[in-house]
Image: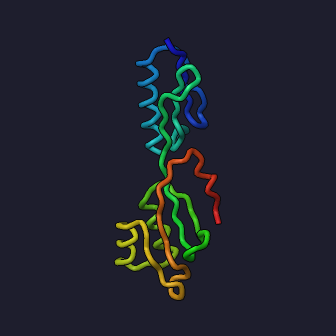
């Protein structure tokens, strides 16, 4: 029987033992807390180990809103918790009207006019890395 350990982001180790049923139940519980985005476990990675090997992992998804010039690193970048927050962020930044906002929301990408909007494009990318802060702010 494997030694099981469940670790939750900044909460730490929440289970150690050999009971697979209990470890799975707690994994689901902490995954739900992470998905809710609230509390100490909100937006945290949940990892189940068996004999020090990862056997199950939940990494919360976040979204990167970017804008810039074609062929260059993004001039603007923000990390947001939801797709709609990313749409709102880029829409506010570029003062997009209703039609262009809907196009951005539908496609996750929008060609812009450099002279009117200050950038040539904006886009939203989903990311599930375990360190949203690693993207940095521009």
Residue drawn at (45%, 26%) of the image:
26
- Vertical position of residue 70 compared to residue 45: above or below: below
Instruction: Count up the numbered dots.
Output: 0
Which of the image's four quarters has the C terminus? Answer: bottom right
- Residue 15: tell me if it is visible: no
Residue drawn at (51%, 82%) of the image:
117
| Residue 94 location (% of width, % of height) | 50, 77
- Residue 97: tell me if it is visible: yes
Residue furthest to the bottom: 115
| Residue 56 location (% of width, % of height) | 47, 31
Could you say which is closer to the camera, residue 93 or residue 77?
Answer: 77
Could you say which is closer to the camera, residue 36 or residue 69?
Answer: 69
Asked if residue 9 lies left or right of residue 124, the reply is right
| Residue 68 location (% of width, % of height) | 56, 74
| Residue 38 location (% of width, % of height) | 49, 43
Residue furthest to the top: 1
Residue drawn at (53%, 29%) of the image:
54
- Hey, which quadrant is residue 99 in on the image? bottom left
Residue drawn at (55%, 58%) of the image:
79
Q: How is the image coloured?
A: rainbow
């Amino acid at each position: 029987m494997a030694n099981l350990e469940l670790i939750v982001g900044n909460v730490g180790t929440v289970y150690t033992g050999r009971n697979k049923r209990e470890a799975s139940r707690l994994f689901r519980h902490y995954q739900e807390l992470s998905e809710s985005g609230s509390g100490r476990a909100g937006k945290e990675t949940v990892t189940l180990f068996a004999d020090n090997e990862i056997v199950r992992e939940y990494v919360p998804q976040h979204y990167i809103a970017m804008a810039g010039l074609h062929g260059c690193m993004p001039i603007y970048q923000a990390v947001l918790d939801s797709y709609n927050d990313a749409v709102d962020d880029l829409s506010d930044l570029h003062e997009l009207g209703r039609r262009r906002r809907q196009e951005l929301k539908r496609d996750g990408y929008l060609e812009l006019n450099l002279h009117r909007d200050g950038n040539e494009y904006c886009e939203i990318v989903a990311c599930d890395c375990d360190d949203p802060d690693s993207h940095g702010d521009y």
